Image (cartoon, rainbow, N blue to C red):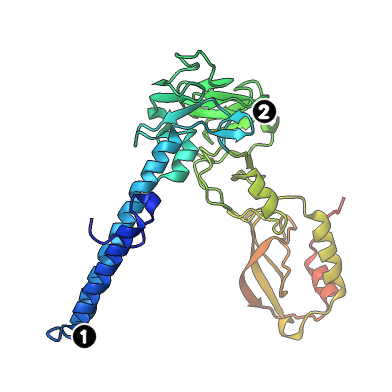
Amino acid sequence: MEGGGGLSEEDGMSERDEAVIRERREREIRAILRDESLSQDGKMSRVKEIMLRDFKAVAAKDREQAEANLALEGQQPMFHAEGVLGCSHYQRKCKIRAHCCGKLFTCRLCHDDAMDHKICRFSTEEVMCMICLEVQPVSRSCRHCGEEFARYFCGVCKLYDNEPGKHIYHCKDCGICRLGKGVGIDNYHCTKCNACVALVSKEKHRCLERSLEVDCPVCNMFLFTSVLPVIFMPCGHTIHSHCYEEYTKRNFTCPICAKSLADMSQLYHRIDETLAEEERPPELVGTETLILCNDCGAKSKAPSHYIYHKCRMCFSYNTRVLERIRISTPTSSGAAYIAAHAIPSVNPS
């Protein structure tokens, strides 16, 4: 192929060949620059064509080499840890052959990380034993050497997991495998959410239709098929467990609906005490604010403030301003104005 500047000997081109091609390219460019019949724009266009030709040749060679490396790598055993067959996602003793592209990967996640398309787990028909390297139809054990591929095997999802002590089951309602001992044992399937929920959370669980068929509000990964732990927030929305831990270090409301994620009564009590002691700014005297409570959804009026507005229904300060209203009987004292509105303080206990 013409123009292969930049390719190394191990990619299939010797240094001598590379030098010859580079010299030819430079000779062609010099000839173009000396050609008086060409305009300056014409010369630049011809030079660009030559450079682009060589760039495309290099890119094509790189793609060929990458595909060759991928095919070779797919035939080699991979390890989850030292002496433990598998990948970074799963422990297992086999690889799957992707039905979409025919390549071997240790798991579907490895495939999706390496390729520009997604695998369909249910379409997998063949696996390769990483003990004897025999490619064969999907099964629990190797038909050639008899090695069991994993402690857990699902013939529907084509899932293999050999991690000791890890509990997995296939939920027929979800249509995929879930972490846990099983429906009716430690989990139950919520038909409205279309998700498996821990039995210990059943009394507190708030249903939201198809609540798992969304992206995590923090990392944007699809939750329904995620292999990472997912939790239900008090409002019913879902999020990765590790994303929730990081998010709540700096936030106290749901990133989707803005409802409070914890008991805020002690904080609200301190805000009550602060507002009772401070004088209202002169520019806010004679005004009140129409607010919407993020926690209970009620609209109410509160003394105008630059930061804090208390819901008159549930006494939460998790509110947002809708409108500032001028009133006819202003008072400058924060304590007097709050007392006049008779909003009870939140019990901090």
The residue lying toward the viewer, choosing from 35 and 56, is 35
Q: Which residue is mark 1?
A: 40
Distance from Cα at disc 1 to Cα at disc 2:
76 Å
Q: Position of residue 174 (x, y in %)?
A: 50, 29
Residue shown at 72% from the left, 85% from the top: 283
Residue shown at 48% from the left, 32% from the top: 76
The residue lying toward the viewer, choosing from 128 and 207, is 128
Q: Position of residue 72 (x, y in %)?
A: 42, 37
**Which circle marks residue 199 in the picture?**
2
Total labels drawn: 2
Amino acid type, mark 2: Leu
Extreme-left residue of the structure: 37
Image quadrant assignment for residue 252? bottom right
The residue lying toward the viewer, choosing from 212 and 265, is 212
Q: Position of residue 336 (x, y in %)?
A: 84, 74
Q: Earlier in the sequence, mark 1 or mark 2?
A: 1
User: In the structure shown, which secondary structural element does the residue marked by tag 1 occupy?
Assistant: helix
Amino acid type, mark 1: Gln
Q: Indicate left or right for 180 with 285 as reference.
A: left
Residue shown at 69% from the left, 60% from the top: 318
